[in-house]
Image (spheres, rainbow, N blue to C red):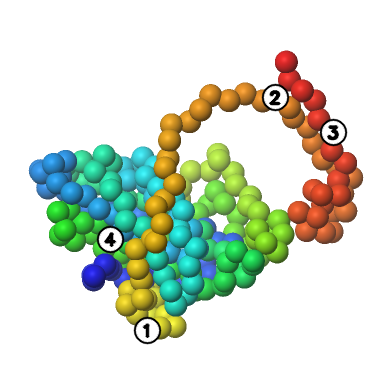
Amino acid sequence: MAFQLSKWIWNNDCTCPSSYVDFSDSFTAPADIISGKNIFRISCDSDYALFINEKFVACGQYSDYEDLKYYDELDVGEFVAEGENRIFITVYYKGTSTSTYRKGKPGLIFEFLHNDEIILASSEKTTAVKNPAYESGADIEMVSGQLGYSFRYDSRIKPATLNIRYADVLSDLPDGDKTHSISPRPIKKLDMLPPKTAKIHAYGSFSGADKSGPMGARMMSAALSFERSN
C-alpha cells in the first residue's frame, strides 16, 4: 500500500482560498541510486509542481474529491543522484468550489522509494512556508465560476529563506486516514515534450470593460484591438 510512512501535511497559517505553499525536504541516496528503480508518489489538494535538485519533474494533480483521492507515481531516476538530494514542491490550494473543483481541506502527502524501499516520506520534519512570489487570498480575481481564480505572480521574487517552519501534520481529515482511500491516477499523465519554437503573430489589449465584474465577463465585453507582427 502506498504512503505507509507518510503523513498528510500543510502550513496551517495558509488555509485561505487561493493559497500557495512551498514544501522542502531532502534525502541521502545510496551509491546504486542510478541503477535502481526510483519512484516518487505524490497527492495534494489542489495542485502541485515538483522539483528535484532544482529541476522540474512534474505537475498536475488528478482532479478528485476529499473522500476519493488519487496520487501520481513518477519515475524520477533521471533527477536523483548519489549523495544529498533536495525536494521542492509548490502546492496550490484552491479552497473555493467551482464547476471543476469541490472544496476540500488543503494538504500534501508524498514518498520517495528506491527499489521499493521508502527513503523519504512527508512528515513534521518537512518544511512548509508561504510562497512569496504568488499572492494568496480570496481577493484574487475569479476568472469565472467554471475556471476559478486567476493568479498574481512576481517572477523577480525568490523562494523564502527566512521564517522557515516545519509543516503541520493534519489530524482532522474527514475520513480519519486519507491513505486508506487513495488510489493511483486512473489515466496516464500528459507527456512533457521539449518546447517548440514560437513567435508572436498578433498582439493587442482589451479595455473599456466594467471593472466591477468578474474577469471572464470583463474580457468578453471589452473592446479588443490588435496588430499583426511582421
The CA span between labels 1 and 2 is 53 Å
Inspect this view and state whether residue 28 appears.
Answer: no
Residue placed most toward the observer, 8 or 64: 64
Query: Which one is in front in this view, the residue at disc 4 or the one at disc 2?
Result: 2
Residue shown at 24% from the left, 43% from the top: 77
Name the residue that disc number 1 marks: 176
The CA span between labels 3 and 4 is 49 Å
Inspect this view and state whether residue 217 appears.
Answer: yes
Q: Which image quadrant for residue 191?
A: top left
Measured along the vertical axis of the image, is residue 78 above or below residue 195? below
Q: Which mark is residue 111?
A: 4
Residue placed most toward the observer, 156 or 207: 207
204 sits to left or right of 91? right
Residue shown at 21% from the left, 50% from the top: 38
63 sits to left or right of 221? left
The CA span between labels 2 and 3 is 14 Å
The CA span between labels 4 and 1 is 20 Å
Name the residue that disc number 2 marks: 201
First in sequence, mark 2 or 3: give its number: 2
Picture coordinates of residue 170, whole percent (x, y)? 39, 76
Query: Which one is in front in this view, the residue at disc 3 or the one at disc 4?
Result: 3
First in sequence, mark 4 or 1: give its number: 4
Q: Which image quadrant for residue 172?
A: bottom left
Which three-letter amino acid code belongs to the residue tagged 4? Glu
Which three-letter amino acid code belongs to the residue tagged 2? His
Query: Which one is in front in this view, the residue at disc 1 or the one at disc 2?
Result: 2
The CA span between labels 4 and 2 is 44 Å
Name the residue that disc number 3 marks: 225
